[in-house]
Image: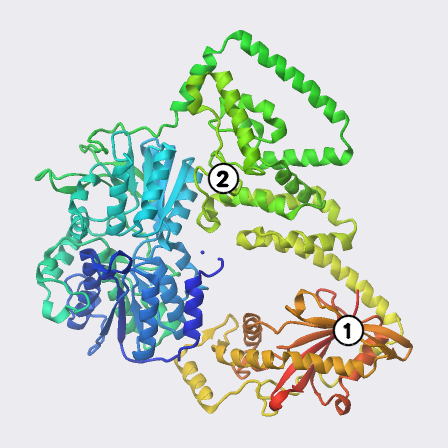
Amino acid sequence: MTSRLPPLLLVACILSSSSAAGQSLNSTVGVLSPVLVKTYGSVPLLAFKQVSMACLIALYHVNTRDPQIVGQAVVDRLPQGFRIDVKFKDSQFDAAEALKEVLAWRESSSIDAIVGPMTSDGSQVVSLVSALQGTPVTSFGASSTLLSDKQTYPLFSRTNPLIMLNAMALIEVCLRFKWKQIAVLCEDTTYGNGFLSNVQEQASSKGVDLVQVQKFVPEGSKSIAAAMSSLQKSRAKIFLYLGIGVPNLELVLTYSNKEGLLQDGHAWVAGEIGVPSAVVASMQHKQLAALLKGWIQIRVAPLYGKKRDLLETAFRTVDQSKVNNSIIGMKPAEYSMPLPDYASFAYDAAWATALGLAKTNGTGAALAHAIRNSSFPGASGLVSFDASGDREPNGIVVTIENIQPSSANASVIESVVIGTWEAAQAFADVSGLTPLWPGGRSGWNPPSDGSGQGRDKLLTIVLAVSGGFLVLLLAISAAFYRLYKASLRNRTAEETDLSNMMSRVREALGVTVSAGYILPSEKSSSIFSCYRRSRVIVMDKRSVEAVAKLALGDDFAKNDFERFYDFVKYRADVVAGRSFGMIADEESMKAETDALDLEAQQGGGGDDRDDAATAQPHPHGVSSDPEPLELEERRGRQRHAVETTHSLYEDEAFTQYLSGDFERAYEYFTGRVLRLNAWRDNPQLLPRLKKHIQRLMDKLARINDRRYESMMKEAGGAELKEVGQGFADALFYQDDHQVRAIRVEEEDRKESSLHKKLETWRRLSTGSLMLREDVFISQLHSRAVLLNDSFHSKLVDVLKAHAAECEVERPAGRAAGQGAKGVRIACHFDDGVHPIEFVPAAVKKKPRMAEKVMEYAAAEEEDAGWPYSRRVLDPVRASVICNRPSHMAQVYRWLTSQGKTGMRVCRVKNKLSLEEAPDGYRDIMVCLLFEGEDRLRSCEEVEVVVGN
């Protein structure tokens, strides 16, 4: 997902950083599983109660050495006397509630490992917080691929398969039934958005068109009702449902039935519903179960045959007095009810965690590694993990199930397996079974997706057109061709270049006239497209021009480019062959739409206006049918279109431009190109951005090298090479007793020793250990904020002591932060009065401090340099820009004269003494020990450099 952290994850970071960290050697497992549904009136659901109980039964089997599910060989792995203490919390199927419970655990209990949560949203925040304390998390329901990122979630594992498997199977079902146009109903959660992203990727690669995507707020009746209304207006016939939870399903059934989307001629395919009998048992309105008849669901099939019977037997025969939990509140009769699929994954997650704890006394990465190496035969089949902690898909079969009336009782529904699919095999029908469709029709002839109807009607219209009308059209075309040739003769060379580049842009993105996308000036040719396309979209010419100008290296309007980017970002369906549109404003859109409607009706006959090209106004200038989706939710399908847009940077015109006026090119790239939103929204484009920046920096380095050679020949140049000798090694660090910007107490050193002993430090690629230094970084940042203004004022006073004229304040630029001022001072130098410029910088941010700390730690072979944050000597920074090398030498002497400044030199980095610099940039960095109000001290840095 990366990408920016969601707001809830940022809250998790803030809350967890203020909590006291700690470790426990007790074998205590925290089970975080849903019972109530917070957003559904806090109603307990049977399926959730069963999943939670599966965790507790598994840990009870661990403590009683019960082999009935996993076998005796697995039980024998448990050391004698090994036991698990259980702490249970109800996550209420809500990420915020899960976060609250984990933070409560951290304050009151010592948890060695966590089983759960069930959702992807909850697993994200819980894993983030738990990783800070070194507590592994093993989920049994989180399927988002975002959680496979081990940089962000290093201690997360899961016993359920990734949702990618379901997505692949969904599209295979569409191909089996020859559906090429489908609509999607998706819950707006991490689970739903991740599922949708995978479906979009698979659909794009297989040629399946998602004609509309509607999202809904979980358990939100108004949201689901609005989504269903939009789906009904789309005229789609085939629907994919990407949602979980019985409350959501009940609302979907209610409003799809109201909109007539469960009648004959429609089909619904669900990503996962579950065992029908278990779903019905959890329904609040059981009469809705009949509306499920004819649905198809994709279901990972872990609970078939002996394993399913064994787990259900375990539920029926377990000593309820030993395992029941007051929070779960299972009733005696509920132990005999059919189990949901996730019960097996929950049972196995608890066993995997227990086996990991039995294998190692370590915590953090060591324990997570032990859990992932705990391969065993579980309730869901062979449980094994890959290096990322994801469940291996080996042996997992996806079943294609059709919900039908039970053969024994027509009022009861059941799932009938009509096909199977595995990643290594094609879709296989089950012989002798016939699918049932909504409305009661049955057979292997499925409802049509409607994709061919418009084309058939269009063909009829075209064949009915008389030969005379075709002649008229040819005459009109010839007239327009003559006008076009005349306009070409009047174009300037610049206009020709721009027009050619616009054509290349449109061709690259597939937004040509022949594809149904026109500019206002091309409206006359749109009548031809009306017969070839289901829609004709009018685009804003200025926006297309902005992209072409960028490709040419010409000045362009950022807002116009951003509009084109939004056009791609929200409606990047060119890849899948779908129409999308962008307009200049609503008024022009309405005028163009009315004109196109009129032309279509006159040319094709008034009876077919439903098939004519239309485009509806939208408040943001984008076609509103279907509604726009967020970029991160559609990244897979947008990648091609966005990358195609930005591939224009590699065009030879841009390369030629870059080789020209470098200063203008550098300003253009940094001032225009880098400010585009696309770079922030598309991390996959960063390698291309780095490539172009590197080209600029390579040329800048050569310029700097030439400037350095020139400086060395100027007066004072040779002297600069000798500056700072004796101060290359730091004389003070931030934790020295003379400084104390960082305070390291004896307890801190004891904690570091214990962390090292338990190997809870982060081990870097060099082999050195990296201890968390958040507290020390916060201390240093706090001290920097307090001393920032006074240090800058002190430096200005030092420079003003040599001033010939009063200083002139002016904005210091973005680097100085909001409200900061630069100061220009005319000073007395040995060769006369010359100006210098003092530019304050913003306080170094904590994330950047953390990066530097990581670099320092990676450079150490041992951990003797701990805490590494002591070596950050530039939390407060400023620059003095001089005109000549000799002026640099004099400014250096002014700053390092302790008797006059009262500041001691901590360290000097003199890049002018280097024969070669990687980027060609050379300056003198002077670190000074500064004392502010109340005798607070810190090592701060000032850069002395020659301008240009």
| Left or right: where 48 falls relative to 186 | left
In this rendered view, identify the residue nearer to me: 109 or 864: 109
Residue at 58% from the left image edge and 42% from the top image edge: 564
SS under mark 2: loop
Residue 242 visible in the snapshot: no
Residue 881 visible in the snapshot: yes
The disc placed on residue 912 is 1
Residue furthest to the front: 587
Quadrant of residue 400 in the image? top left
Residue 280 appears at what percent x and percent y?
A: 17, 48
Residue 613 appears at what percent x and percent y?
A: 48, 26
Residue 458 appears at what percent x and percent y?
A: 44, 19
Residue 844 appears at what percent x and percent y?
A: 60, 73
Kindly identify the amino acid type of the residue bearing the numbered disc 1. Leu
Q: Height in image: 133 above or below 733?
A: above
**Residues tagged 2 and 1 counted as in contact (Cβ below 8 A):** no
Q: Which residue position is annotated with label 2?
A: 618
- Between discs 2 and 1, the one toward the N terminus: 2
Q: Height in image: 266 above or below 91?
A: above
| Left or right: where 908 falls relative to 118 | right
Q: Height in image: 421 above or below 691?
A: above
Crowd class of label 2 (few under 14; some 14 to 19; many from 20; radius 10 Å) = some
Q: Which quadrant is the C terminus positioned in? A: bottom right
In this rendered view, identify the residue nearer to me: 917 or 836: 836
Crowd class of label 1 (few under 14; some 14 to 19; many from 20; radius 10 Å) = many
SS under mark 1: helix
The disc placed on residue 39 is none
Eye-nearest disc, 2 or 1? 2
Q: Height in image: 396 above or below 122?
A: above
Kindly identify the amino acid type of the residue bearing the numbered disc 2. His
Quadrant of residue 255 in the image? top left
Quadrant of residue 105 in the image? bottom left
